[in-house]
């Protein structure tokens, strides 16, 4: 059946959201099919009471069939529920209050059956999370520790019992499964009724607190493995921001406010690590920082952590000046509150060095790197993970400054130390090996560079998987060195494979994907495929300007590469328009 669309309005005359409704014929046929009752008169009265809405009729039909009710009995129960305080008019549109009663009757029905408390608690959890749906794995995780009930956590249940609960709720038309069964979703109207009912009973804050604790635990666990499941990181971020929105309906409560601030920080952290939604990261970070400065003070540890994260987000979109200012402020506050030798202060100094390097202030970056490395070797030890990271970063800066011999020596030391401390297959060890291979390439030691790149790629494919972001970057680096060595055909094949995988794994607009597309365009240009190179460079530049901004270093490099391709094609005027001189 195909319900017809109708736009409902609230009593103040505001335009509402599009609401799909059944025709009379569709409604009567639907109710007869779902309930097995041939009573057109009773069905018509029920459909009118529920505004001909498929959502409400589905819940009514499920309960009527489950409890073997007639239409009149269901209507009596529906009209007897006190829902005058629910479904108050809102600008987004107004549904009949009888719909709220239908939702509550369905909830009463599942609550009275087997695993009733768990059924209610699952719906409580769904009501404060994303309207787009919730992964079944998240429901399982909540079930193991106790789902959020009205009066506290419900006793833990096993995943198979949780799946049985989800099936019952689906049968009651309170939720639906995704096509592959990996997620469940509840209609926004059902979620709204449940939240308003929780508010009326004074239970919404407790449910939100339990949901916040759950998401915080999941964030802590996922922070160690997020790059192996980027989809899970995106989904968890969406759930956290949905809960933040739901909590705006709760009365002011300092403990909940602190928990929600923590979730907002996690959302910012994941968005920065994913690096594919920089504008959203900045929006979340700016609002969180303002709230923390007001509630906690400008020098609170959590405030400083957010300022540091926001500075990183600014760097991702090429707002280098803003990033530098914020990193400098963070470092000054860290030195003032924690002391110049505290590990967090040293980390802040290292972050400032990174953004100096990205801004082209290489000499200042190297000075900070050297100072940080010396302090970490003295305070943390030569083989501490933070020390090794700083040594790696300093070696990369030396290479960019043309101090290739020093870079190679330092990278060789770093690889050896990470190999000894972390093991040959640790991701950081593999990363250092890749950086050493790049330094060999810059020194003209192409045979060693190719051998090390090939070994690193093979190890990452074995340890991390073929589609891990680090593996993809290594594949791109190997393709680059093949191109430098004149193995253009191999380079093109590998870059094409890399780009396709990055688009699938990271998304078309991820910064790494954009760089990969630009590298493939350069390879096309080397092979004399100028028209293809120009088309791809134009696409890359447009995407970089949109995603990273016109002044980001990657954008500037892309603009220069496009100008070079224009010159190869004899399009000199267009090359000059890119403000790049031959």
Image: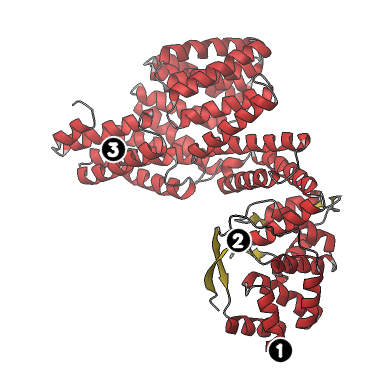
Q: Nearer the viewer, residue 85 or 183?
A: 85
Q: Tell me if 72 is positioned left or right of 327 in this view.
A: right
Mark 1 or mark 2, which has the lower sequence index? 2
Q: Nearer the viewer, residue 264 or 390?
A: 264
Q: Nearer the viewer, residue 379 or 577?
A: 577
Residue 37 at what x, y percent from top left?
Answer: 72, 87
Q: CA distance from mark 1 to mark 3?
A: 72 Å
Mark 2 or mark 3, which has the lower sequence index? 2
Mark 1 or mark 3, which has the lower sequence index? 1
In the rendered image, which residue does mark 1 sit on? 39
| Up-down relation of residue 280 to residue 138 (above or below) | above
Residue 392 at what x, y percent from top left?
Answer: 51, 21
Q: Residue at x 47, y 36 (%)?
A: 455
User: Circle 3 — which element?
Assistant: helix
In the rendered image, which residue does mark 2 sit on? 10
- Asked which quadrant contains residue 77, the reply is bottom right
Residue 464 at what x, y percent from top left?
Answer: 55, 42
Q: Nearer the viewer, residue 548 or 90?
A: 90
Q: Residues within 10 Å of mark 1 (few under 14, many from 20)?
A: few
Q: Tell me if 281 is positioned left or right of 301 in this view.
A: left
What is the number of the mark on residue 189?
none
Check the picture and name the quadrant holding the N terminus.
bottom right
Question: Which of labels 1 and 3 is toward the front?
Answer: 1
- Is residue 411 visible in this depiction of the protein? no
What is the number of the mark on residue 522?
3
Q: Residues within 10 Å of mark 2 (few under 14, many from 20)?
A: some
Q: Residue at x 69, y 61 (%)?
A: 190
Q: Tell me if 519 is positioned left or right of 570 in this view.
A: right
| Up-down relation of residue 475 to residue 359 (above or below) | below
Q: Residue at x 57, y 48 (%)?
A: 231
Q: CA distance from mark 1 to mark 2?
A: 32 Å
User: Circle 1 — which element?
Assistant: loop
């Amino acid at each position: 059946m195909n319900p017809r669309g109708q736009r409902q309005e609230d009593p103040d005359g505001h335009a509402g959201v599009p609401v799909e409704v059944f025709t009379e014929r569709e409604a009567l046929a639907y109710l007869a099919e779902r309930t097995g009752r041939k009573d057109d008169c009773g069905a018509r009265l029920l459909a009118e009471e529920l505004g001909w809405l498929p959502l409400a009729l589905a819940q009514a039909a499920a309960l009527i069939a489950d409890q073997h009710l007639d239409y009149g009995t269901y209507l009596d129960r529906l009209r007897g529920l006190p829902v005058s305080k629910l479904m108050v008019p809102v600008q987004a549109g107004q549904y009949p209050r009888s719909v709220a009663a239908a939702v509550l009757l369905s909830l009463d029905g599942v609550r009275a059956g087997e695993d009733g408390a768990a059924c209610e608690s699952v719906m409580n959890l769904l009501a404060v999370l994303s309207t787009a749906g919730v992964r079944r794995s998240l429901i399982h995780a909540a079930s193991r520790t106790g789902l959020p009930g009205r009066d506290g956590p419900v006793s833990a249940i096993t995943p198979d019992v949780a799946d049985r609960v989800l099936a019952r709720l689906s049968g009651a038309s309170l939720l639906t499964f995704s096509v592959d069964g990996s997620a469940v979703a509840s209609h926004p109207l059902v979620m709204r009724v449940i939240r308003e009912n929780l508010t009326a009973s004074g239970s919404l804050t407790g449910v939100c607190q339990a949901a916040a604790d759950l998401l915080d635990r999941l964030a802590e666990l996922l922070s160690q493995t997020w790059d192996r499941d980027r989809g899970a990181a995106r989904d968890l971020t969406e759930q956290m921001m949905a809960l933040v929105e739901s909590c705006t309906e709760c009365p002011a409560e300092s403990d909940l406010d602190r928990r929600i601030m923590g979730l907002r920080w996690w959302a910012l952290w994941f968005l920065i690590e994913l690096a594919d939604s920089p504008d959203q990261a900045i929006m979340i970070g700016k609002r969180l920082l303002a709230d923390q400065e007001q509630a906690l003070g400008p020098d609170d540890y959590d405030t400083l952590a957010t300022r540091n994260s926001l500075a990183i987000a600014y760097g991702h979109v090429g707002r280098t000046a803003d990033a530098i200012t914020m990193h400098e402020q963070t470092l000054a506050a860290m030195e003032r509150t924690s002391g110049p030798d505290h590990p967090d202060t040293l980390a802040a100094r290292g972050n400032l060095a990174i953004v100096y390097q990205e801004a082209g202030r290489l000499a200042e970056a190297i000075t900070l790197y050297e100072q940080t490395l010396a302090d970490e070797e003295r305070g943390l030890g030569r083989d501490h993970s933070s020390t090794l990271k700083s040594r790696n970063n300093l070696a990369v800066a030396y290479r960019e400054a043309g101090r290739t011999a020093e870079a190679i020596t330092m990278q060789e030391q770093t690889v050896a130390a990470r190999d000894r401390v972390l093991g040959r297959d640790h991701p950081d060890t593999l990363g250092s090996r890749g950086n050493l291979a790049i330094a060999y390439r810059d020194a003209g030691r192409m045979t060693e560079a190719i051998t090390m790149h090939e070994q690193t790629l093979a190890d990452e494919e074995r340890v991390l998987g073929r589609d891990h972001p680090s593996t993809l970057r290594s594949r791109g680096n190997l393709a680059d060195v093949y191109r430098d060595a004149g193995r253009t055909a191999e380079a093109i094949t590998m870059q094409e494979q890399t780009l396709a995988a990055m688009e699938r794994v990271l998304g078309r607009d991820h910064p790494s994907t954009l760089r990969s597309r630009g590298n493939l365009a350069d390879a096309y240009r080397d092979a004399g495929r100028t028209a293809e190179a120009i088309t791809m460079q134009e696409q890359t530049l447009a995407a970089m300007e949109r995603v990273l901004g016109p002044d980001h270093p990657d954008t500037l490099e892309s603009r220069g590469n496009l100008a070079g391709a224009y010159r190869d094609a004899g399009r000199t005027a267009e090359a000059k328009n890119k403000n790049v001189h031959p």
